[in-house]
């Protein structure tokens, strides 16, 4: 029952489409207001994307910070091509590939860490996090990225295709395949818990 | 849980753990980069189109690679590169790939067929297969008497590879050779067109070459007659060693005609009788070469209605054949 209420009470994904080339140029010119706008709009999808790459909460946070710093230090070099999010995702992806913190924490260690972090402890739901870890382990990287961007950030499939430089058909097929995997996983868990 | 519920739960779980790093990133001083590095580098439209173009070719490249690998595999492992004939009385031909592994076997008589079925040979090195065949032959009573005779013949067009194959075969029968040097004979098949003729007589290429050699040495015997002889007698005839053979093994002379391998005739005659062609094969450094001039002279003197007149040729043989070749000058006389 509690779980059901939680599901119904989940916030709807936010749309994040206020990012354009001009905003990045303004950041390049040290416009703090522009950076604030960027942060407000992309923090959720960017973190979801990085989490899909790293599958590790702490590493994802580190890379999230590094990505913002890279944006600030390179925004003045940005060439307007109409796809600022594609550039930001590329930075995040390159940083993820660079990171050498390969030793992943177990789910238990991670939950302990999150529960004791004052930024999360008030709202943190242990079951949700276990569920998230499980689904991250069930999907491949493409499926994770697409599903998290779509479900968490409200990105349309067409926008994901553009910003991740993928054909729309690839995005759609990976999304569909990933969701089917998750549904089967949930059904299996339900059946085995009975 | 349906799709919508799964999505909502993922959404909620990620939102719970999304950190707020604003204070760590918004105001800390950063050094402006002088140029893009490999992290921040933008993919420019030209570069992208190039990579997209390259990616577009990927299936074609992959298909070519698969085709290349298939051709290479066929060329290396399946294409017949050389042939080895093992003749005792059972007569077997081994077809070898480039690695000298046996890829096909042909048995020329029922005894050979039973041997082939008893011995594993597929993709085994040729020496191993020969050893196994010899072992099986001994078990079945072959190669036991002093009069037994084993002939290995190999056909390989490339000189260097032929020498290497010859060495491998000699090594394979070294023990038998040491026991009885007269028992084993290893020869290279040098007449390229011999396969068709061997098929006509249903003998191995090695035996066919021996028949041809024997016929050249003993023109009084026809190929048909020689093809009926046992291997050792053929060997003696081909080496002109009949004096060392038991008397009973000598065939009674039979007049020609004989049949010989021939290159395409150069005189443009459509129906070419083949009986007299042996007269124009010349032996040169253990190889046989076709003598066009000899063949033209024969036709000039004895050609009649699209065939050679046997009586005429016989007269030329009587007058000009020295046992090895026709004397050109004799034609003029």
Image: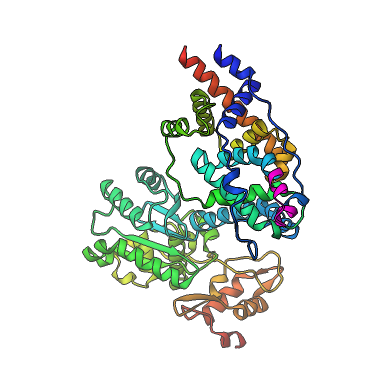
Is A105 on the left-hand or right-hand side of A35?
Answer: left
| Image x and y of residue B64, in percent | 63, 55
Please give the name of the residue rendered at 43% of the width and 61% of the height, measured from the top-left corner: B207
Q: In which quarter of the image is the N terminus of chain B?
A: top right
Nearest to the observer: residue A135 or residue B263: A135
| Image x and y of residue A33, in percent | 72, 47
| Image x and y of residue B119, in percent | 35, 46
Give the overall secondary structure of the magenta segment.
Answer: helix
Q: Does the magenta stretch include residue B322?
A: no
Nearest to the observer: residue A176 or residue B264: A176
In the image, which residues are magenta?
A: A25-37
Q: Is residue A166 visible?
A: no
Nearest to the observer: residue B42 or residue B64: B42
Please give the name of the residue rendered at 54% of the width and 84% of the height, measured from the top-left corner: B327
Pick out the residue farthest to the left: B179
Note whether B331 is above or below B134 in the view shown: below
């Amino acid at each position: 029952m509690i779980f059901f209420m939680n599901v119904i009470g989940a916030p709807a994904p936010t749309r994040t489409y206020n990012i354009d080339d001009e905003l990045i140029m303004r950041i390049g010119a040290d416009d703090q207001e522009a950076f604030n706008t960027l942060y407000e709009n992309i923090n959720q999808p960017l973190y979801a994307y990085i989490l899909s790459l790293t599958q590790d909460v702490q590493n994802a946070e580190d890379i999230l910070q590094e990505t913002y710093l890279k944006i600030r230090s390179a925004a003045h070099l940005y060439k307007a091509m109409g796809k600022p999010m594609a550039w930001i995702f590329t930075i995040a992806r390159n940083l993820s590939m660079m990171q050498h913190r390969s030793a992943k924490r177990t789910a238990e260690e991670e939950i302990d860490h999150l529960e004791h972090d004052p930024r999360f402890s008030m709202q943190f739901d242990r079951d949700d996090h276990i569920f998230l870890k499980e689904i991250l382990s069930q999907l491949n990287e493409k499926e994770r990225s697409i599903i998290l961007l779509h479900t968490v950030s409200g990105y349309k499939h067409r926008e994901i295709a553009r910003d991740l430089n993928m054909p729309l058909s690839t995005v759609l097929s990976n999304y569909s395949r990933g969701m089917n995997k998750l549904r089967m996983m949930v059904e299996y868990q339900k059946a085995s818990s009975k | 849980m349906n799709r919508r519920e799964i999505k909502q739960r993922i959404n909620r779980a990620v939102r719970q753990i999304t950190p707020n790093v604003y204070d760590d990133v918004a105001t800390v001083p950063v050094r402006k980069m002088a140029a893009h590095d490999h992290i921040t580098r933008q993919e420019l439209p030209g570069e992208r189109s190039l990579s997209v173009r390259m990616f577009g070719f990927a299936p074609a490249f992959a298909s070519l690679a698969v085709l290349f690998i298939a051709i290479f595999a066929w060329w290396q492992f399946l294409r017949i590169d050389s042939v080895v004939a093992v003749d005792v009385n059972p007569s077997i031909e081994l077809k070898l790939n480039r690695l000298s592994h046996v890829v096909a076997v042909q048995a020329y008589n029922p005894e050979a067929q039973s041997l082939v079925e008893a011995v594993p040979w597929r993709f085994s090195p040729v020496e191993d297969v020969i050893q196994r065949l010899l072992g099986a032959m001994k078990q079945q009573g072959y190669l036991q008497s002093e009069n037994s005779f084993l002939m290995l013949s190999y056909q390989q067009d490339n000189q260097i590879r032929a020498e290497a194959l010859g060495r491998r075969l000699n090594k394979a029968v070294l023990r038998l050779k040491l026991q009885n040097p007269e028992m084993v004979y290893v020869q290279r098949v040098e007449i390229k067109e011999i396969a068709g003729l061997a098929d006509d007589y249903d003998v191995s290429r090695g035996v066919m070459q021996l028949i041809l050699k024997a016929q050249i040495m003993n023109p009084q015997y026809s190929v048909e007659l020689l093809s009926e002889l046992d291997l050792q007698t053929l060997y003696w005839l081909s080496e002109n060693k009949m004096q060392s053979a038991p008397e009973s093994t000598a065939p009674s002379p039979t007049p020609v005609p004989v049949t010989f391998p021939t290159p395409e005739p150069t005189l443009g005659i459509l129906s070419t009788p083949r009986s007299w062609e042996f007269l124009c094969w010349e032996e040169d450094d253990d190889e046989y070469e076709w003598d066009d001039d000899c063949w033209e002279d024969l036709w000039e003197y004895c050609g009649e209605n699209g065939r050679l007149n046997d009586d005429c040729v016989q007269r030329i043989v009587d007058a000009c054949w020295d046992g090895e070749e026709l004397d050109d000058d004799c034609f003029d006389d």
